[in-house]
Amino acid sequence: MTQRTQLHRFVAAVAGLTLLAAACGSDDPGPAASPAVTSTPTDVTTTVPIGDAPGEGGWIDGEPKWLDSGAVDGDVAVAADSGAAPTGREVAEESFAESDVEAPMPVEPDGGIGDGAEPLPIEEPPIDDPGLTTPLRAGSVDDNADFGGFLAYLERIAGLGIATRDLDPTGRSIITVVDDAGLPVPGVAIEVAAGDELITLRTTADGTVRFHPAFYGMPTDGVAEFGIAFADAELVPVAAGENITMVAPSADIASPVPLDVLFLLDATGSMGDEIDRLKQTIDTVAERVAALDPAPDVRFAMTLYRDEGDAFVTANYDFTGDIGEFQAALADVIADGGGDYPEALDEGLADALAKPAWRDPAAAVQLIFVVADAPPQINRQLETPYTASIRNAIERGIKIFPVASSESDDQAEAVFRQLAQATGAPFVFLSNGAAGAATGESTDITSTDYEELALDELVVRLIAEELSDLQRDGQGPVTVPTTVAVPTTNPEGQ
């Protein structure tokens, strides 16, 4: 039997080329109406909800216990008779009560203060760090645009003894799917056959997906050949490292475009210096994404992670289209715990992909923003390491945008760039965090490699670019409402 005949036997037809066939409106509690997906992804180690749960917000399995000891600086205790952990707001209120700031006098039910005097206005505690009012600024680089440079970077840091989980990107092939007019066709399920392996991938909003044979233990010597097909198209042989463009029927894109955005946040104590500013940034992002023109049918979700031995390892807030509800949950988040430098990023990413109610990957643009300052515990043996989650995301067409925060080191940067490159996203990093630019000492990123923007401006721009790939003739690009003009710079040094 010839290799081509073997490949034909392993390539299955895939239904669902009509991407985004129907929106799942944020005010509609029903599941998205979308084509059935007949292929089964391989090597996926987490449960993938596909269009069968609308997501209604709220903490999955209940709001987490925020503090290990029930205290802020040892002063805030959980009420002995409640048996429950305090909410983020209760902790903040108790912290205010125990601070050195003079609290306002209590107001009686009749509006007075007990002696008939006028009530005093409530004053906020003073801000000790003026930087908390300064917007975070960030830059980004696309390692797929300079793939050779990325491979050289990985080789160099490995030579320095900087370890990551094994995720060899050599032999990468970019598969681009367009229609007869040359427009990208997102959400297409593509199957790759190699020997006895059958791997399902899905194109993202720009109509591309990256196949990394080494991710699946396959050869990358340039001689190895794989078969790629979708729907009833003829099998196309592709060599390792070869890019290919395929033509498919035009996508029927829903209006408004369904958009699921999940924020995966490191909620350990080392993030405390920036967590409040990050809350403000994410608040602004949520509001501005909802105000894009044309506006998407956007939902937000949140997964938090700390580490083993903390008050929680992971906590998940389900998707909701209620921006105010999401912002209120985000306001409750408290940074605490962590212990050693690495954190439970593996577990957090696995939860982010499995627990919230994502919509059908053939019917929604799906993005994850990882905001963190530390690498995962790469020596920990897990059922779902981050390498398996990366394959899961590629197979579902989910892009992962890491946002490196202050104190990120070489190992953190390398892992974050693995997440971004594999899923087709840029690597984002703070350029003015509490400890300076959030790149490692051995980075190859220089100040001339990126444009610096306010972090919320950059994140909204990245989301708008994803949506613009779905615009068709006469629609024009997605436009971002202007708030405050922010000059761009290329700062000196790192």
Image (tube, rainbow, N blue to C red):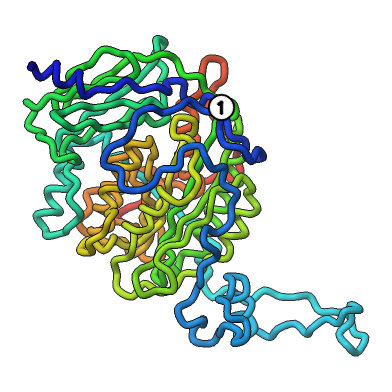
Q: Is residue 391 visible?
A: yes
Foreground residue, 317 or 76? 317
Query: Tag 1, which secondary structure?
Result: loop
Q: Residues within 10 Å of mark 1 (few under 14, many from 20)?
A: many
Q: Is residue 110 left or right of residue 350?
A: right
Q: Is residue 487 visible?
A: no
In percent of width and height, residue 96 lies at 62, 80
Foreground residue, 481 or 193? 193
Q: What residue do we see at 29% from left, 66% from top?
A: 342
Foreground residue, 125 or 43? 43
Q: What residue do we see at 50% from left, 37% from top?
A: 51
In percent of width and height, residue 299 lies at 56, 43
Q: What residue do we see at 48% from left, 38% from top?
A: 463
Q: Which residue lies most toward the top here?
A: 180
- Asked if residue 161 is positioned above or below residue 401 in the image, the reply reads below
Q: Is residue 27 left or right of residue 455?
A: right
Q: Quadrant of residue 87?
A: bottom right
Q: How many marks?
A: 1
- Asked if residue 120 is positioned above or below residue 413 in the image, the reply reads below
Q: Quadrant of residue 3?
A: top left
Q: What residue do we see at 52% from left, 15% from top?
A: 473
In percent of width and height, residue 62 lies at 55, 64
* Quadrant where the N terminus is found in the figure: top left
- Tag 1 residue: 22
Q: Which residue lies most toward the bottom here?
A: 115
* Quadrant where the C terminus is found in the figure: bottom left
In percent of width and height, residue 367 lies at 44, 42
Amino acid at pointer 1: Ala
